[in-house]
Amino acid sequence: QAHLVESGGGLVQPGGSLRLSCAASGNIYSINRMGWYRQAPGKQRELVARIIFSSGDTTYADSVKGRFTISGDNAANTVYLQMDSLKPEDTAVYYCNAFMFLRTNLDFSDYWGQGTQVTVSS
C-alpha cells in the first residue's frame, strides 16, 4: 500500500502565493514521476504540472507556465508546487499524483492524494 499526503492549500488573494507539498509513503520501490492535477467545480480534472524524477524533466499546463514551479525530492518521495501570481481561475481542488512501483506490485501504477483546496479570492 501507498499513501500520498498533501498540504499547503488555503485561501489567498489574487496575486498571492501558495506552496503545496505532497509526500508519498508506504512500500515504495521506485517513483517514476509525481505531479499535480486540479479540478474546479463543473470541470474535468486537468494536469497542472509534473516532474520525472530520473531526468528532472517538467511539464506544465499552458495556463500556469511562468507562474507555477514544480520541484521534487526523490530521496524523500516528495513533490512541491510553488504557485505565484495566483488568479481566481486557479481556484480548484489540487490533487497529488504519483506513478510508482510498490514492492507488493509487479508494475507501475498511478496513485492519488485526497486533494487540497486552493481558493483565490479577494
Image (cartoon, rainbow, N blue to C red):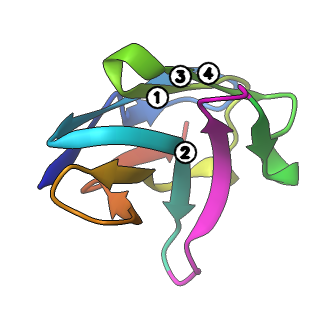
For numbered disc 3, what is the local secondary structure? strand
For numbered disc 4, what is the local secondary structure? loop
Q: Badges 1 and 3: C-beta atoms under 8 Å apart?
A: yes
Q: Which residue is mark 3?
A: 72
Q: CA distance from mark 1 to mark 4?
A: 21 Å
Q: Which residue is mark 2?
A: 35
Q: Nearer the viewer, mark 4 or mark 3?
A: 3
Q: Is residue 49 left or right of residue 10?
A: right
For numbered disc 1, what is the local secondary structure? strand
- Read off the magenta span: 42-56
For numbered disc 2, what is the local secondary structure? strand
**Badge number at residue 98:** none
Q: Badges 1 and 2: C-beta atoms under 8 Å apart?
A: yes
Q: Which residue is mark 4?
A: 16
Q: Nearer the viewer, mark 1 or mark 4?
A: 1
Give the mark nearer the N terminus: 1 vs 4: 4
Q: CA distance from mark 2 to mark 4?
A: 21 Å
Inspect this view and state whether residue 120 appears.
no
User: Which part of the image, by quadrant, shows the N terminus?
Assistant: bottom left
Give the mark nearer the N terminus: 2 vs 4: 4
Q: Magenta stretch containing residue 104, yes or no?
A: no
Q: CA distance from mark 4 to mark 3?
A: 22 Å
Residue 49 in picture, x, y percent from top left: 67, 45
Q: Residue at x 38, y 15 (%)?
A: 75
Q: Which residue is mark 1?
A: 79
Q: Badges 2 and 3: C-beta atoms under 8 Å apart?
A: no
Q: Residue at x 33, y 59 (%)?
A: 112
Q: Within 10 angstroms of label 2, few (less than 14), some, or many (20 or more) residues?
A: many
Give the residue type that dot 1 points to: Val
Q: Within 10 angstroms of label 4, few (less than 14), some, or many (20 or more) residues?
A: some
